[in-house]
Image (cartoon, rainbow, N blue to C red):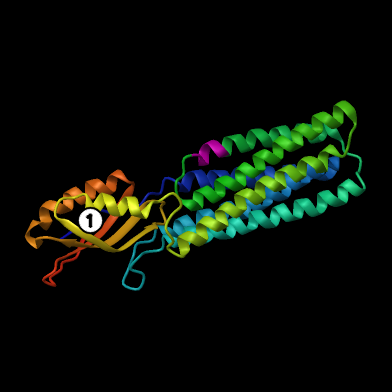
């Protein structure tokens, strides 16, 4: 008995494409402004925005590939293209953070003159642009959109750092504030990049998602009347962020399975499992495979 339903969502395409266009435009503006003003915070943010252009382009491409239907040669479809893209983007965040730290150390040793007024104007415009893009990307649950979101969030924080540095430089003339705030942005990027690399690696390896209690799931299933044992229990994350489960369920009487299945699906739905594949079996050696979608 099988109960499958499939729906491909393309809702993320438009936000990613919009974010890509806007980011490309402003990366050029910010790079020119950073070069003219001499601001490292602004140039670091421009480099990060340039990396965002590549990150958003990769995310949009991965989303398009993932929407391709499954076929005989790719029975699981192309959903993991989004996970691979997210991992590349996570590594890119770490690379950008390293570049910012490298240049910031040089600037601390020999702080250049920075035109605080121009820096402040361009940084404030960048801040507004990043707020708009974040609003477009907010709410994406798949890890690919999360990776794009982190890149843009890093840009927003870079813009905040550049605005703050601009205010300090205009007010006091203290130049070291520029590279010092760049260090803060780098630390945040390392944190976000590490989380993305960790989560995508876990997902590609079909690891148990963080926060999932396997024993709680097992006990929920054993709580259904007629279920004697649960083994070969596996839980992993699908490319769209939903949790999937497969298990062998030992039952008292195979004839009662049609009544047990809905109860098992309800129990699993209560612990957040969205896609379920169960194989019932009993002591007499008979078994049957059942695939069902909890919601």
Q: Main secondary structure of the magenta part?
A: helix
Residue 70 image-quadrant placement: bottom left
Q: Is residue 29 left or right of residue 251?
A: right
The magenta stretch is 134-138
Which of the image's four quarters has the N terminus? bottom left
Q: Is residue 137 magenta?
A: yes
Q: Is residue 188 left or right of residue 209?
A: right
Query: The residue tagged with tag 1: helix, strand or loop?
Result: strand
Which residue sits furthest left? Answer: 255
Q: Is residue 11 left or right of residue 228?
A: right
Residue 250 image-quadrant placement: bottom left
Q: Is residue 146 left or right of residue 253?
A: right
Residue 200 on image: x %, y %:
51, 58
Instruction: Please say if 288 is above or below 135.
Output: below
Residue 139 on image: x %, y %:
46, 40
Q: Residues within 10 Å of mark 1 (few under 14, many from 20)?
A: some
Taking the spot 88% from the left edge, 46% from the top edge, the residue there is 108
Let me know if residue 164 appears in the view: yes
Taking the spot 87% from the left edge, 52% from the top edge, the residue there is 106
Residue 134 image-quadrant placement: top right
Instruction: Please say if 73 is above or below 22.
Output: below
Q: Which residue is mark 1?
A: 292
Q: Is residue 185 magenta?
A: no
Let me know if residue 58 appears in the view: no
């Amino acid at each position: 008995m099988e109960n499958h339903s499939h729906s491909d969502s393309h809702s993320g395409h438009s936000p990613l494409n919009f974010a890509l266009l806007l980011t490309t435009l402003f990366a050029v503006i910010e790079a020119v402004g950073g070069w003219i003003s001499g601001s490292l915070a602004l140039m670091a943010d421009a480099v990060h925005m340039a990396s965002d252009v590549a990150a958003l382009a990769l995310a949009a491409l991965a989303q398009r590939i993932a929407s391709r239907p499954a076929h005989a040669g790719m029975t699981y479809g192309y959903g993991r293209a989004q996970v691979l893209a997210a991992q590349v983007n996570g590594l890119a965040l770490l690379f950008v953070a390293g570049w910012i730290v490298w240049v910031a150390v040089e600037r601390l040793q020999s702080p250049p003159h920075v035109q605080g007024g121009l820096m402040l104007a361009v940084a404030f415009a960048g801040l507004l642009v990043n707020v708009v893009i974040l609003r477009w990307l907010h709410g994406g649950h798949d890890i690919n959109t999360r990776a794009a979101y982190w890149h843009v969030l890093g840009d927003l924080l870079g813009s905040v750092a550049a605005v703050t540095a601009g205010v300090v430089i205009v007010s006091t003339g203290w130049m070291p504030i520029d590279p010092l705030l760049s260090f803060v942005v780098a630390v945040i990027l390392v944190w976000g990049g590490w989380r993305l690399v960790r989560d995508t690696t876990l997902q590609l390896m079909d690891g148990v998602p963080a926060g999932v209690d396997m024993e709680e799931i097992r006990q929920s299933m054993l709580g259904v009347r007629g279920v004697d044992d649960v083994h070969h229990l596996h839980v992993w994350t699908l490319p769209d962020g939903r949790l999937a489960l497969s298990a062998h369920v030992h039952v008292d009487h195979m004839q009662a399975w049609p009544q047990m299945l809905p109860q098992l699906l309800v129990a699993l739905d209560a612990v957040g499992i969205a896609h379920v594949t169960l194989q019932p079996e009993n002591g007499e050696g008979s078994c049957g495979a059942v695939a069902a979608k909890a919601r």
